Image: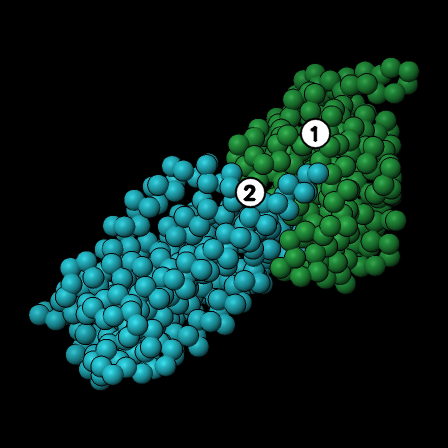
Chain colours: A green, B cyan
Amino acid sequence: MLLKICNVTFAYNSVDVLKNITFEAKEGEILGILGPNGAGKTTLLKCIFRALIPKHGVILLDGTDIKKFSQRELAKNMAVVMQEDIVAPFTVLETILMGRYPHLESPFKILDVSSSKFIEEIINMLELGKLLDRGLNEISGGERRRVHIARALVQQPKVLLLDEPTVHLDLNYQLFIMEIIKRYTISKRIITIATFHDLSLAVRFCDKVILMKNGIIFAAGKPEEVITPENIESVYNVRIKVIKENGKILAVVPLEITRRRL
Amino acid sequence: MVLEVYREKLRRRMFFLVLLIGIFFLSIFLGISIGCVDIPLNAVWEIIFNHYSENRVYLVIIWEIRIPRVLIAAFVGAALAVSGCLIQSILRNPLASPYVLGLSSGAAFGAALLVALDLWLIIPIPLSAFVFSIIAFLITYRIALEDGRLPISSLILAGMAVAAFFSAMTSFMMYLAGEKLEVIVFWLMGGLYGLSWDELKVVMIGITPLLILSLFLGKDLNAMMLGDDVAKSLGVEVDKIRKLTIVIVSLMVAICVAYTGPIGFVGLMVPHMVRFLIGSDNRFLIPASIFFGGSFLVLTDLLARTLMRPAEIPIGIITSLFGVPFFIYLLKRRKGLMKYVA
């Protein structure tokens, strides 16, 4: 399983937001997309699952151009959790089961019994068993995030796309969710691509990162190679200190702003 | 385990749906049996099933007046309630009613124009109301369209603008109408007067396929309530479904409004009442709204024509007057009700 993004350029109102983006994501790995606000991280994610259509370039899933998939075929391959906190008038279980929609053959089929064991595993894994009958509006933001992640996993995607999966979550939930995603990515051999603002978290969980600035890839590679004080200062205009332990990066601490962003 | 509980819930929802279908047919039977003139039940029965009665007057009242009127009420109630569900889902806004697209304002102008210009005896009001309703919709649609998509906010704002424009034009027509003002005001109150089998045929042929089509949209509309991006990732062709839904709603509502004038409450509140009872899953909500909405309008129309008989109260007054207490009851009891069904 291989996802190739080749020379992707995307424009909003003829302003190029992504310029010639090229990279690959492999199965069993988490790929992190880093960069300041407005660098094009979310736009790139939306291009990958075809919510936005690039001006140039192709995206290949195992050699097949994703443009060739029908919307439903694509949904059987890719699942998404957006960063917005989505509250709809459904219960937790109803929301999770929506992940099965692309797999339901008729518009009147409510449930496919064959997947029930698998669905239950995911519900237990994300510790949502006690919340199933609650409305999405009756639970906390952190709980909702877990619901939407469960919804995406129930979809049985080959590619999992996460837009800032840990934003607004407390320390405990941040680690909890990232550990689940890490384990799931490895055990099911899926491709996970996630955007991050928290560099420490990205370093810790990503196998590869790309660092974006103004719609281009500024640097890409192993987290230790990309997240260096020099790179971060050129992209974020912030001086950082990288704290290492046994040669691995433990934390990335921001020290001071070197230049106000305009 | 988890899904067993869910399946039990689905079973209860199915049962509730069957119950609503029973209530629907019961309402229709009540609507036909009760009215301004008291007719014995066995005579009603005989007319419905054999189209025969020894009493010619009974035959005319039941066959020519009540049956078309009650069935039109059933279709219009169903269509308005379903349109409300669809439009609230598609706009992700619980305050939306099918009239937000400017449809009723266009229809009102179409009716007022004919009356003001003294053409209403030559051109039928429903025709003009239908045409202007569709014109209003097309203008809304055209304004809202951006790069081949229909963004939600543009759709709401365009609908509001078009509605405001046509309301102003309607007021202008009323200002010009002079002593015919009464005719316009009466039409604007909405009602199921003077409807015959001819109108019933149009309503039936127009609305039935649209109701059936709307049954297929439940799953996609559910997904779209999680936002356009998530819906796409769940395999929904968002732009296509939104356009299709808007067209279905517009045609249904234009047909309804043309014959009955703008009847309030049903399109806005009935979907919520059904949600309180059966939950928000559109795969159940849409069919439930068909039968709930149909029953609701048949029964409120029954009240409208019998409460002050032989006089008739405009139905728009009754739908709100009796609908609101019922709505409040459901609102207050929804937690308890949900336990059983939703």
Circle 1: is it few (<14), some (14-19), or many (20+) Cα within 10 Å? some
The quadrant of the picture occupied by the N terminus of chain B is top right
Point out residue B98 in the picture as x, y percentages from the top left corner: 40, 58
**Residue drawn at 83 percent across, 50 percent down:** A4
**Subunit of label 1:** A
Point out residue A235 in the picture as x, y percentages from the top left corner: 72, 31
**Residue drawn at 44 percent across, 77 percent down:** B205
**Residue farthest along the left direction in this orientation:** B179
**Residue drawn at 36 percent across, 70 percent down:** B71
Point out residue A106 in the picture as x, y percentages from the top left corner: 67, 61
Point out residue B231 in the picture as x, y percentages from the top left corner: 62, 51
> In this picture, is A164 found above or below B266?
above
**Residue A90: image tag:** 2
Q: Amino acid at mark 2?
A: Phe
Give the camera-side residue of A99 and A173.
Answer: A99
- Tally the numbered discs: 2
Q: Is residue A227 left or right of residue B217?
A: right
Q: What residue is shown with label 1? A: A127
Give the camera-side residue of B283 and B185.
Answer: B283
- Callout 2 secondary element: loop
Circle 2: is it few (<14), some (14-19), or many (20+) Cα within 10 Å? many
**Residue drawn at 64 percent across, 41 percent down:** B5
**Subunit of label 2:** A
Q: Amino acid at mark 1?
A: Glu
Give the camera-side residue of B50 and A152.
Answer: B50
